[in-house]
Amino acid sequence: MTGKSKLPACVVITGGTGSFGRAVLGDLLAAGVEEVRIFSRDEAKQDAMRAEIDDPRVRYRIGDVRDAEAVRDALRGADAVFHAAALKQVPACEFFPVEALRTNVLGTHNVLRAGIEAGVRSVVCLSTDKAVLPVNAMGISKALMEKTALAAARELGARAQTVISVVRYGNVMGSRGSVIPHFRRQIAEGRPLTVTNPAMTRFLMRMGEAVDLVRYAFAHAFQGDLFVRLVPAATIGDLAEAVRRVAGAPDHPVVITGWRHGEKLHETLATARELARAERLGAYLRIGAEMQGLGPLRPADPAQLAAEPVDDLSSDRAERLDVAAICRLIARADADSAPTPSAGEGATPADRGWKAA
């Protein structure tokens, strides 16, 4: 059973005042969704968002995904849940790993359980490439988040009303806390750009592509599917150079600071084992869930095993953007950051990728 592409009547966005929440909210309103519930902890951000987006279809609920009762109340009567609430800052999670566990793992458990109880037809959980072969607390907590979602999907089975899926992101350009806004602030304030290691590579994804990925998972997921969008990568050194050029400050000073707590040299979007069972769907990879139980292993085909990929999909092996290409991508990402559209601005459900009921 898939999540189905029918336009959902009511969508809950956990962590909805964040960058993704704002972007997908505009998408949903333009498509004609009847109700969108923003569920988040920060009343100040909700108040600012309410003042910016004047639409009676948007409902705001103060609450924390750690609070199971608050989550149940927020999800009652919903058709779909986009679970974006998370602790995302790598250094902060290194110093407060239990807090990362409580939000990213136990909070996800609360969302999944409440979604199943409420009979929502789709729960899409947002993950990160840092969950793959993790070395830091944030990545470990997100890996456990993915495993929590898969365990719930396996328990439900293919015929369940609620379809659980996961999407895995790289670096979403322009999102709050990402490196491009950080570099731009440093230039605007006259401070040197702080580059940890110029040779570090990161996958780069526009916010519009991030929204597209969630939309695709909602429309096409089978129980327990994980979706990855194939995107290019760049070195942090080239990214800093591109930001300087776009800002008209090609000679702005750069300082090499060394690695932050918990950082990796390269990131990985999918392991070789995941790639072995992945299905290529245009720009996406659909990685089906391993749904077998804990019983004896079945015999394997040696020829099939020999043909499986041996390399992970890592940022040092992906398509590499040069500085000029990064500049063009930044320009496209800036276009994605246009003000959130209100209803009736000319976009139809088909334009936005959602299908009307």
Image: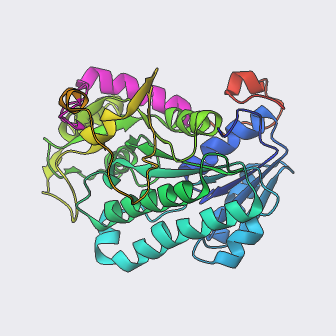
Whole-percent x, y for residue 117 in the image: 73, 65
**Whether residue 271 is visible:** no
Whole-percent x, y for residue 111 in the image: 62, 65
Q: Which image quarter holds the C terminus?
A: top right
Height in image: 236 above or below 41? Answer: above
Whole-percent x, y for residue 227 in the image: 47, 38
Q: Is residue 276 left or right of residue 74?
A: left
Whole-percent x, y for residue 269 in the image: 32, 41
Number of numbered callouts drawn: 0
Q: Which image quarter holds the N terminus?
A: top right
**Whether residue 344 is visible:** yes
Q: Nearer the viewer, residue 208 or 228?
A: 228
Q: Nearer the viewer, residue 98 or 2?
A: 2
Residue at the spot 26% in from the left edge and 32% down from the top edge: 301
Instruction: Give the residues in magenta.
Output: 308-337
Residue at the spot 14% in from the left edge and 57% down from the top edge: 257
Is residue 317 one of those drawn in magenta? yes
Q: Is residue 105 left or right of residue 259?
A: right
Height in image: 187 above or below 251? Answer: below
Q: Nearer the viewer, residue 295 or 40?
A: 295
Q: Is residue 346 left or right of residue 112?
A: right
The quadrant where residue 146 appears: bottom left
Q: How is the image coloured?
A: rainbow
Height in image: 229 above or below 295? Answer: above
Residue at the spot 35% in from the left edge and 78% down from the top edge: 96
The quadrant where residue 266 appears: top left
Is residue 202 one of those drawn in magenta? no
